[in-house]
Amino acid sequence: RLFVDPHEAWLEQVVFYSDRMALQATYWLKVQRGIYECDDTQPHAYLTEAELLKRWRESGVCPDDNLFSGASLKALDMLKSDDGIIFENKDGVNTYTSSSIIWPWGCFILMHLRRNLMMIILLLSIVLGSLYLYVTINLKKKEEEMVSEATNKVMQMLKKQKSPLKSRHFVPLPHIKDDLFSSKTGNRIWNKVKQRVESDSRVVTTPKLVQGEQMLTWEWIQD
């Protein structure tokens, strides 16, 4: 066009900026509603007209001061006519409340945690229970391997002691315990080994006097 009406150009810019401001305000109002629903300390779910104007100023959505007044008035009118916005006048103060909600991430997570608390507790219980069972089974398996290995060592020791070259064919229990079981092994493994050896029909347990001290001894009796 060869001639542009300044007033028409001004109106086009007002419409452009007012659309942007209305969209921005709609988002703010949804977030404000979400904060209110989530936070008990938040006093209200709405934003006042003055708060919207301040936020628009601070955001720089309309950088032209000559356009700001007209664009902001049109944006406010757009909000009033929006079915998703509740406009009220509270004691002479214009307020705008969104009927929709945008939940803050922290609140969104907290809300779902509250709603699914029992399910979360159940899942945690299953995970922790499974972990405990896994650790317990592996510890028992390891302990069983240690008991079996130690029992075999005792049996081999008793068999060697049965050799005709040995001056005595028995082995005192305290000597076996001192030779094969360190303090780290503990009495738990030793007690289980002791039970297995004493229940073996190839081994006899008898008290004997060893170096002037009465001790229980094991002796291999099978040829």
Image (cartoon, grey):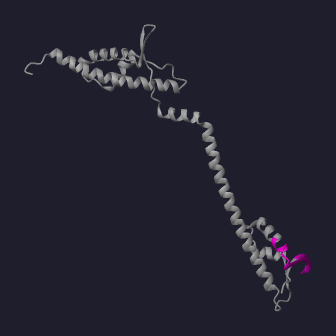
Q: Position of residue 222 (x, y in %)?
A: 84, 84
Q: Extreme bottom residue here?
A: 165
| Left or right of 152, for residue 30 | left
Q: At 79% across and 84% down in the image, what residue appears? A: 159
Q: Quadrant of the N terminus?
A: top left
Q: Nearer the viewer, residue 10 or 77?
A: 77
Q: Position of residue 122 (x, y in %)?
A: 64, 42
Q: Quadrant of residue 31?
A: top left
Q: Extreme left residue here?
A: 2
| Left or right of 43, for residue 17 | left
Q: At 33% across and 26% down in the image, what residue appears? A: 59
| Left or right of 211, for residue 90 | left
Q: Position of residue 218 (x, y in %)?
A: 85, 78
Q: At 47% across and 34% down in the image, what residue appears? A: 105
Q: Nearer the viewer, residue 68 or 203?
A: 203
Indicate whether 165 appears above or below 25: below
Q: Which residues are magenta?
A: 196-216
Total residue callouts: 0
Q: Is residue 21 magenta?
A: no
Q: Quadrant of residue 56?
A: top left
Q: Quadrant of residue 174?
A: bottom right
Q: Extreme front residue here?
A: 83
Indicate whether 47 appears above or below 93: below
| Left or right of 14, for residue 99 | right
Q: Nearer the viewer, residue 41 or 149?
A: 149
Q: Position of residue 100 (x, y in %)?
A: 44, 24
Q: Quadrant of the C terminus?
A: bottom right
Q: Is residue 200 magenta?
A: yes
Indicate whether 92 appears above or below 11: above
Q: At 66% across and 57% down in the image, what residue appears? A: 135
